[in-house]
Image (tube, rainbow, N blue to C red):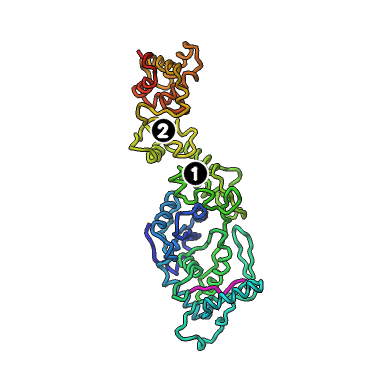
Amino acid sequence: MMASGSASGEAATGARGVVTRFAPSPTGYLHIGGARTALFNWLFARHHGGTYLLRIEDTDRARSTEPAIAAIFDGLEWLGLAGDEPAVFQFARSERHAQVAHALLEAGHAYRCYLTQAELAARRELAQAERRPFRIESEWRDADPASWPADAAYVVRMKAPRDGETEIADLVQGAVTVQNAEIDDFVILRSDGTPTYMLAVVVDDHDMGVTHVIRGDDHLNNAFRQLVIVRAMHAMEGGWPDPVYAHVPLIHGADGAKLSKRHGALGVDAYRDEMGILPEALFNYLLRLGWGHGDDEIISREQAVAWFDIAHVGKSPSRFDLAKLQNLNGHYLREADDARLAELVAARMPGVPDRALLARAMPVLKVRAKDLDELASGAAFLFASRPLALDEKAASLLTADARGLIAKLHNALAAQGDWTSDALEATLKHLAGDWGLGLGKLAQPLRAALTGQATSPGIFDVLVLLGREESLERIAAQAEPAEQA
């Protein structure tokens, strides 16, 4: 995915209709909560026939890394949530951000503030001592430029409104009102001339033509500050409409606490690489975290686009349930193309396993599997070398009597010409009857001999998948030598 350093300030929003954006900071993996935010933005744009954009907010140069950027793009591609246009990189647009800051300064919507860090700290401590909220009350807000100290460092602050209130008609939270007196004169340009996040977000959203800002509700307070900039620029230039906001509750763990590392995997890559989750399963699960369509649990991508409505996202945090995700993943494994699964499973197995054999095995392996690792584990017997290593349960099944039975079975199966599931089932049932055994008494030691395990796909499927020659060799290896003909 290529980067775009700038976006036109003349974005033809009307021509593109609805425009949403996902704007992660590249300081680590693609967080599962960020992936859901991207999903909601993608769906909202698709539902309305609009445009979904990506912006990498890489202004924190110390923490933004190329591997993190690559991980974000990789995770979004895997989930099918790549942007409709090349991604915009925020840092590359610093000059544009500063240009807007200087325009606001010249128009009187912002001011130079020469308060030092020591002065601010002293005022903050005083407010704490007096048990009152700390608010920036800068004497530089309305100072005469003639009083500006020469060669002294300053920041540029917005002149936040002091009277009245601001209301946001949030698509998720409903009407939210803040008294303007609670909004600080926040910094938009640092003393080194670099723009702050608060300014950069507003300028980028405008220049990219973003109509709907869908993001986590931890940004709700930021919206009131950002509107100060939007409305000031609209008063100066026109064409800076308020975006429509939708602040989505964060995802919590099963214990109700904010999702953190102690709840398990947080990055999308971990669900794919370490847990064997399919992208369609994670897509479906994230969709249902806080949004629903009646009692529907299994929702296709096409249905999601048709049904999605941001207004139906709940106001309360959703709880992440790994067991539900795994159950959903099991459904998508059973629905998945066998050749595709074979490729995914092969990548989780040692050596270069036979893809064609894996694909033939998938219909019986994926019946109970919940993830790709379980599929790989279930398929391991197909490629095991003789003599087969027996797990504890399999070894307990192969008693001396059972090995003698296996030897008799080897002789009978050696004469078997038709090596199909139906024919093998008929033969084994006939033998069990002749020997006065239940089929299970014959199948269990046979399973142990063929797979080295006490559990496997159906025994007739195992025989067919291994083939006549390999099956007979494995049976012979576990039979008592004295009993072999």
Left or right of residue 312, residue 337 in this image: left
Q: Which residues are magenta?
A: 181-189
Q: Which residue has dot 2 on it?
A: 379
Q: Residue furthest bottom?
A: 146
Question: How many numbered marks are there?
Answer: 2
Quarter of the figure with the N terminus: bottom left
Occupied quadrant, residue 449: top left
Q: Which x, y percent locates residue 64?
A: 42, 62
The 10 Å Cα crowd at callout 2, few under 14, some 14 to 19, many 20 or more, is many
Q: Residue at x 47, y 50 (%)?
A: 268
Can residue 48 be seen in the rendering of this structure?
A: no
Q: Is residue 430 magenta?
A: no
Q: Foreground: 148 or 216?
A: 148
Q: Position of residue 103 (x, y in %)?
A: 47, 77
| Residue 183 within the segment the image draws in magenta | yes
Relative to residue 365, is residue 32 depicted above or below?
Answer: below
Question: Is 383 left, or right, of 35 in this rendering?
Answer: left
Q: Amino acid at mark 1?
A: Ala
Instruction: Say if residue 145 shows up in the picture.
Output: yes
- Who is closer to the viewer here, 99 or 71? 71
Residue 470 numbered tag: none
* Mark toward the viewer: 1 or 2: 2
Residue at the image position 49 percent from the left and 49 percent from the top: 265
Assign a secondary structure to mark 1.
helix
Closer-to-camera residue (203/379): 379
Tag 2: amino acid: Ala
> Residue 281 has which mark?
1
Question: Helix, strand, or loop for circle 2?
Answer: helix
Earlier in the chain: of badge 1 and badge 2, it is 1
Which quadrant would residue 359 be assigned to in this image? Answer: top left
